[in-house]
Amino acid sequence: MIRITTMLLGLITSLNAFSQTRVQLKIDSVFRMMHAQRQFNGTVLIADGGKVIFSKGYGHRDTLSRHGNTRETIYELASCSKQFTAAAIVLLHRKGMLRYEDSLVKFIPELASWKGVTIYNLLRHTSGIGEYFIDMSAGWDHKKIATNDDLIRFYASRQDSLLFTPNSKHQYTNTNYALLATIVERVSGLSLAEFLKKQIFLPLKMNHTFIYNSRQHPEKIRNRATGYVWKRNSFDKITSENPAYGDSFVFYLDGIVGNAKVNSNVNDVYKWIRALKDKTFFSSEEFNLMTAVTKTSSGKSIPYGFGLDLSGNNDDLSFVHTGSWDGYATFIHHNMSKDRSVIVLQNFKMGAYPFKTISQILNNQPIGVEYAKKISLPRAAVEKFTGVYLDVDTNGGQQKITFLDGYLIHNSKAVQWDMRFFPINENCFQAIRQGGADAVLKFTEMVNGDTKLEMLQRGKVIGTALKKKVSEI
């Protein structure tokens, strides 16, 4: 009897191991495909039922050494940094050093024109404050790196009015979390970097997580990935401020913290998720407040807690955030009821994350086509669609299609999109877009020799243009 029981337990263990291996192979095949067709470059960690079942890196952390991405590779978390700034506020509230109802002006009196804004408003993006990304792009010296103090002086000199009455709307803006960072610093007497390290990262043994301003205070950091974009009209990877891409944005805003600038790896991010899930770092009351869906003054739900997007309900709550900054793309998702975490960190701006496909694999469901597979076509079969297309619905509008290494590149007369498309059948091309937003170019060769171009977004035609046959040009 004991022998039979032992054999049955061994069989069950073997079947579970086989099932897990099959899941791992399916997930790996998805990411290998996406990496091969230039849609992914980074590290993935997936946990299900509280256990890590998949973790792997794809591509390189930098183009010079060509060291591979691994579980230890460190990435900029971009907007996923906001949850740590929010956590710092919670800890200061716990110590009685501030209240959520406190006014912004109490801690930053320079911004008296924003009277009525509370810490709650900043946390939940209901403040009515404008976006500093937009405002400082026009009103700041792009040759100078701005800090949080500079941001405050910038707005204090402008005396801007609020865009709406606090708590009447939910409008995501990075300025809110930059101001929260300053509140943390003024209340605690420590820099945000020091406070997070002392109060959160070290206690949770997140030994590879830190704030880093790479332009303001450059350092050589072991295992840190370089963030990349594509050189215009090329598949060469370069940094954002390279003149061949020309984004000065990441330079002159490099010194501002709170809304971004936390760096970490998938292992440390998972430690953070475990602390939230298991409520070992925050009390149940604190966690419930951090993940509460509240309402605006008009009764509209705000699906945003303390640095976390929220979905589901108390029985099936998920908290999630995405981020994009300086050639990095981040996706962090956790479902409480399944105890399932999906962490995707990339050092490639246009990177996508196949969350829907991962969920289908983990749920043992049929796998749909979330990200189409690139097919091989002869060069001539792709190049024939290049040229200038005249918009059907606008006067003078033009769409320019060029060829690059088996892909098509789309630009318009109005905007240089530099968007790349790969073939998914003989006349349809799928876009490589940040986060994987769906876009397709569909070409139809007309009886009269013209070529029709339809631009589709989520299956819906959003624009049509025509290329005349050569004899008519």
Image: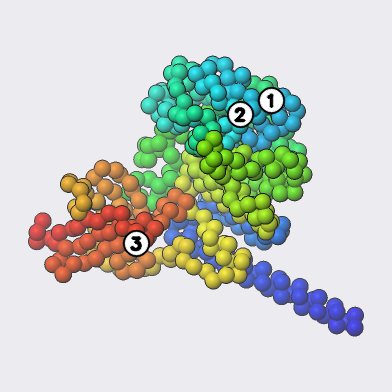
Number of the label disc, if any, that sits on residue 394: none
Pinpoint residue 393: horizontal percent, then vertical percent: 21, 51
- Secondary structure at numbered mark 3: strand
Q: Amino acid at mark 1?
A: Leu
Of 73 and 278, nearer the camera is 278
- In the rendered image, the residue lying farthest to the left is 471
Q: Tell me how far mark 1 sits from mark 2, CA to CA.
A: 9 Å
First in residue order: circle 3 vs circle 2 = 2
Q: Which residue sits at x=35%, y=64%? A: 423
Question: Badge 3 local density, few (<14 within 10 Å), some, or many (20+)?
Answer: many
Discs 1, 2 touching: Cβ within 8 Å: yes
Question: Badge 2 local density, few (<14 within 10 Å), some, or many (20+)?
Answer: many
Colouring method of the image: rainbow
First in residue order: circle 1 vs circle 2 = 1
Number of the label disc, if any, that sits on residue 429: 3
Pinpoint residue 221: horizontal percent, then vertical percent: 60, 38
Total number of numbered discs in the rendering: 3
Question: Badge 1 local density, few (<14 within 10 Å), some, or many (20+)?
Answer: many
Q: Amino acid at mark 3?
A: Phe
Tell whether 74 sits left or right of 280.
left
Q: Which residue sits at x=45%, y=22%? A: 161
Residue at label 1? 98
Q: Tell me how far mark 1 sits from mark 3, CA to CA.
A: 54 Å
Residue at label 2? 119
- Secondary structure at numbered mark 2: helix
Q: Which residue sits at x=74%, y=31%? A: 94
Quarter in which the N terminus is drawn? bottom right
Q: Is residue 196 above or below residue 15?
A: above
Q: Tell me how far mark 3 sits from mark 2, CA to CA.
A: 46 Å
Please state which of the two labelled residues, at mark 1 or mark 3, is closer to the viewer.
1
Pinpoint residue 276: horizontal percent, then vertical percent: 70, 45
